[in-house]
Amino acid sequence: MQPIHRAYLQVNTDLNALTEVLSWFDQFNGPPLSYQTWLQCQLALAEGFTNAVRHAHQGQPLELPIDIEVTVLSACLEIRIWDQGEPFNLRQKLDSLPQEMDSDAEGGRGLKLMQRIADSLSYTRTSDNRNCLLIVKHYPEPDS
């Protein structure tokens, strides 16, 4: 399946870069994504990026890059976020979190939120010793 649109961004490990990440993601606001789907994906991207900064790269230099790739296909949007932190078992972590989100909880809400938004969510170690968070969101294919 050929991508309709694909873009790549590299930013430093800095929460202040979230503004740049979200501004960059604006290019995907339009068909074939509905505005609601785009907003959901924007939220998932923000959560994934802030988790990479706060958790995966905690204590690392600001210069340590976080790579982001977004691919729009006819039936889904794929967001990939690569970090260089220690790997962890996403499934196990999600299973250990309470089913209902506690609004007063210190952490874990972002993972649950991404899980609710995404049709597929994975976190895998790559051959270059990075981790890739993959968020896939399906939407109706446009009429041919």
Image: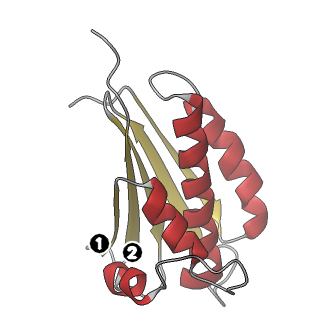
Secondary structure of the residue carrying tag 1 is loop
Residue 115 lies in what quarter of the image?
A: bottom left
Residue farthest toward the front in the current orientation of the protein: 100
Relative to 119, 26 lies left or right: right
> Where is residue 73 shown, x and y percent of the image?
33, 32
Colouring rule applied to residues: secondary structure
Q: Identify which amino acid the numbered label 2 is placed on.
A: Arg
Residue at image point 38% right, 34% down = 139
**Residue designated by label 2:** 130
Specify the amino acid type for callout 1.
Answer: Thr
- In the figure, is residue 102 to the left or right of 136? right
Q: Badge 1: few (under 14), some or many (20 or more) residues near its Cα, within 10 Å? A: few
Q: Which mark is residue 45?
A: none
Q: Does the CB distance between marks 1 and 2 fall below 8 Å?
A: yes
Q: Which residue is mark 1?
A: 126
Quadrant showing the C terminus = top left
Whether residue 78 appears in this view of the structure is yes
Quadrant in the picture for residue 105: bottom right
Q: Is residue 30 above or below residue 72?
A: above
Residue ID at (25%, 28%): 2
The residue at the far top in this view is: 144
